[in-house]
Every structure is written in structure tokens, then in C-alpha cells.
Amino acid sequence: MAQNRSKFSMTKVQTGILIGLGLLVIILFCSIVWLVFGGRVRLPSFSGAAESTPVPQITATPVIFPTLTPTATLTPVPYEQLIPAGWKQFKTELVEIWLPPSFKLVEKEPDEELALRGETSKNSLYTMGATISFEPMTGGSLDAHLDAGLAKMDPQIKLTERRKITLNSTEAVRMTFETRVETVDVNQLTYAIQDGGTVWFVYFTAQINEFYEMLPIFEQSVKTFRVVK
């Protein structure tokens, strides 16, 4: 009987295998359909853009900025209000300055516009003085002019202070020097004031002990300095 069976006929085992394969195909097909249409499958993007990561939204908090107040323009104090009561005027055709009446005019050097000497105490070995001079400005700026002058200064004279200040709305440079004249320690307060292409210098010189006593007077006096127009 086995020999007469057609070569196309299948045994029961083969038939079972075919049925099982068919069922497997059906199950796979159904699974693919569910994944594409019902499942949450993210298909790859071919645009080249990476999948974006959610960015948390920041709730803006209102910020109150302070109100900016414009810088007030300095108003020059009337010249008459700068002169202390009882002080004396010293004036030339070019400049004017006020000092206590204890200061007297003395003979000036060729490079000086005004030269004065103050009353010196009995214990002082150096005569107190106030001097005004001027020179053409070189170097393109006041600082450059001063730098060139300081570079030529006697090394025995020590610069102890240099800073920019405002003299009644006019910019100036304040400098303090220390030196020794023979056996006496001497200090000098110097103001450099630019007036166009001219630099004016106002000097106050005194022995070190008198210098600090007179410093408030020197600082008040320089405020009364002005170029006569």
C-alpha cells in the first residue's frame, strides 16, 4: 500500500506542519497590521533631523529695573563765593588767585607769572611760597605733557600723589611731591590745569610740618585760581 501512494501525497505529519506554518503567517500579518495602525510605533525620520527632546517652558517672572537718573551736569559755583572772607587778591594781566593777607608778592623768576611768600613760623627753616607759571602743552594731552615732565624730574624729588580732580567744573591734575633741601624736609602741592594749548601750574611749597597745617588753605586757594579772559 505504501508503494502505491502518489509522490504528491503527504503524510499526516507533513499536513500538520503546513497548517502550523499557515497559522504562523496569519498571526505575524495580524501583528504587523496592529503595530502600524493601532500601536504607538514611531517610524524613523529620513529628514536627518534628530528627534526633538521636550524643553520645559520657563515661566517668565517680571523684573523691575531701577529708573535711570541722568547724571547732573556740574554747575560752576559763582567765583565770588569761592573767595574766603578777609583774603587778598593777587592778579596779573593773565591770572588771578586769592590767599590770606599774610602772603606777599616777591620778585618772580623769568618762567613765573606770579610769585608769593607766606609768613613763616620762627621754627621753620624754609620759606613758605605760592607760585604760578605756564608753558605750552606738548604731547597731545595733559597726561602726556605731565609724563614727559616727570621723566626729567630730579630723582631726589619724590612724587607721592597724582590724581585727576575737578576745580569748579574744570578738570585738573593734583600732584604732591616730597624732597629734601639741605637738611629740611619740604613738601609741594602742585596743580596742573589745561587751558587750550597752555598748561598752568599752581605750586604751594612749605616745610613738612607747616605743609600739613596749611594744606586746607592751599586747597581753598587753588579754587580761586582763574585765567583772566
Image: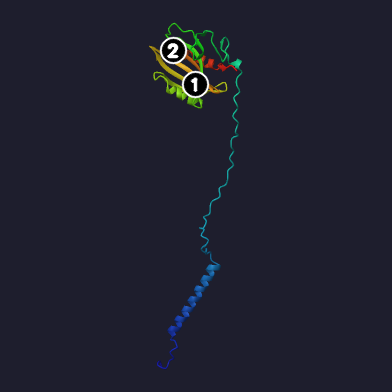
Please name the colour scheme applied to the rendered image: rainbow
Q: Nearer the viewer, mark 2 or mark 1?
A: 1
Q: Which residue shows up at 46% across the image and 78% down it?
A: 21
Q: Quadrant of residue 7?
A: bottom left
The answer to whether 35 is drawn above or below residue 98 in the figure is: below
Q: Position of residue 151 (x, y in %)?
A: 43, 23
Q: Residue furthest left?
A: 183
Of 89 and 56, nearer the camera is 89
The answer to whether 24 is drawn above or below residue 94 in the figure is: below
Tell me the crowding category of disc 1: few under 14, some 14 to 19, or many 20 or more residues within 10 angstroms, Cα based.
some
Of mark 2 and mark 1, the one earlier in the sequence is 1
How many numbered marks, from 0 up?
Answer: 2
Q: Position of residue 94 (x, y in %)?
A: 56, 15
Quadrant containing the C terminus is: top right
* Residue that carries the numbered disc 2 in the rendered image: 209
Tell me the crowding category of disc 2: few under 14, some 14 to 19, or many 20 or more residues within 10 angstroms, Cα based.
few
Amino acid bearing label 1: Arg
Amino acid bearing label 2: Asn
Q: Quadrant of residue 84?
A: top right
* Residue that carries the numbered disc 1 in the rendered image: 174
The answer to whether 188 is drawn above or below residue 28 in the figure is: above
Which numbered circle lies on residue 215? none
User: Circle 2 — which element?
Assistant: helix
Q: Position of residue 129 (x, y in %)?
A: 48, 11
Quadrant containing the N terminus is: bottom left
Of 189 and 9, nearer the camera is 189
User: Circle 1 — which element?
Assistant: strand
Q: Residue furthest top?
A: 122
Q: Position of residue 167 (x, y in %)?
A: 55, 21
Check if mark 2's residue and mark 1's residue have beta carbons within 8 Å: no
Q: Between marks 2 and 1, how big is the CA–CA gap? A: 20 Å
Of 182 and 106, nearer the camera is 106
